[in-house]
Amino acid sequence: LSPSRSPHMAKMIEYLRKLGKPYSKVVLKYATVVIQSCSPHDAISVFIDSPVGTEPLDPMEVLEYLEKRDEAVIKACVKSGSSTLPQDDDTTLAILFIHNLIASEEIGNPVLHNKLVILLLQFYMHLCAMEAPQHDNVRKQLFQFLRYSKHYVARELAPHFKSTELHEEYAVILARMGRHRDALKIYTHTLKSHKHAREYCEMVYPQNPDIFVMLLETYLQENPPNISQAVQLLQNHPSKLPPEAALEMLPGETTFSHLQNYVGSVLTLQQTRNRQNKIILQLMRKEHLKAMVEKKRLERKHVIITRDTVCANPNCQRRFQRDGAFARLPNGDIMHYACYEKQ
């Protein structure tokens, strides 16, 4: 809690925390006083880390209450024409609370993760409408959460971003849905960021080796085809694009002068692979020869089983049948195979 918090308010916070779920209406009623007098981080402490033996409040009931409080504050700011919130924080009570819920959960809850994304998106939109300075920080929070959270349901969030100007965030969601072509179009057509498009391909390549081909197709499907970026992609990543397919995709007006460096890189790469393959073949031949020598050495070892030969297992000592399976031990002893397995 903040050191600037008054002793009276500290006692009130501690008292409300001890009431718990049976007195949730009382807690929510008097929490308003705390919210009006304290910073958001102090105010939220009323609802988290309940003392041992106290039944925690229903988190969804608390979240609904905090959302209404946040909405009232934002509406008041909009109505007054203010471009700043009462507090300097780039967050809201509901966002703070749900962050705490997510941090304390043992198993990721998709409902909570989706809810946090929606809250951050709505808060960002409000801040932009108010021209509040905190909107950049809130967008960073949103982007980082979309990128690193593994528990939100992308298909449920996609409609919320489709009609916004948050193109990078929408691309992250599309990528999570496996819609790589659509994500690449955002990077190349909308954002005009070929650097981000290539970085995206590098990230996806281990799971989807066709991703660079998709990017090449995206460049060539532009009107007119973006030949310069397509050729640059070929030159920078010759090992990740099959040359035959890539060259067939290029339009007829592509000249050899455009492709000279790429062709040279492909030929050099092919020569390197051929040398590597020859080395591997030589090593495999050596291993095969060693295995054949070892096989012949082992085949020279033999045993003679006569009518008087008995099983070396002391609990057996029976003779061998003509067609019975047997096992030869490293010391030369012979056993029935069944006796050997029982050892």
Image: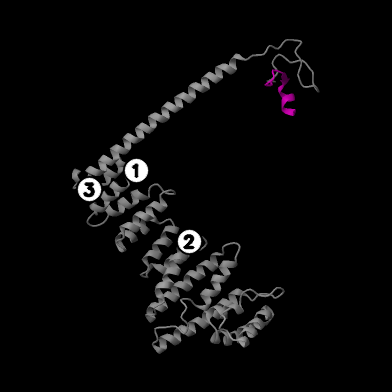
Q: Which residue is mark 2?
A: 148
Which numbered disc, 1 or 3, marks the residue closer to the eye? 1
- Which colour scheme appears in the figure? one colour
SS label for mark 1: helix
Q: Earlier in the sequence, mark 2 or mark 3?
A: 2
* Left or right, residue 256 beside residue 293: left
Q: Which residue is mark 1?
A: 239
Cα gap from disc 1 to disc 2, whole angstroms? 29 Å
**Which label was assigned to residue 106?**
none
Cα gap from disc 2 to disc 3, whole angstroms? 39 Å
SS label for mark 3: loop
The residues colored magenta run 328-343
Query: Mark 1–mark 2 contact, CB under 8 Å?
Result: no
Viewer-closest of 105 and 284: 284
Q: Quadrant of the C terminus?
A: top right
Q: Earlier in the sequence, mark 1 or mark 3?
A: 1
In the image, what residue occupies the spot 41% across and 53% down? 203
Image coordinates of residue 9 in percent, x first then y, are 61, 86
Q: Quadrant of the N terminus?
A: bottom right
Number of numbered markers? 3
In the image, what residue occupies the spot 34% across and 43% down? 239
Circle 3: residue type: Pro
* Left or right, residue 327 beside residue 122: right
Identify whether 271 is placed above or below 212: above
**Which label was assigned to residue 251?**
3
Identify whether 183 is placed above or below 297: below
SS label for mark 2: helix
Which numbered disc, 2 or 3, marks the residue closer to the eye? 2
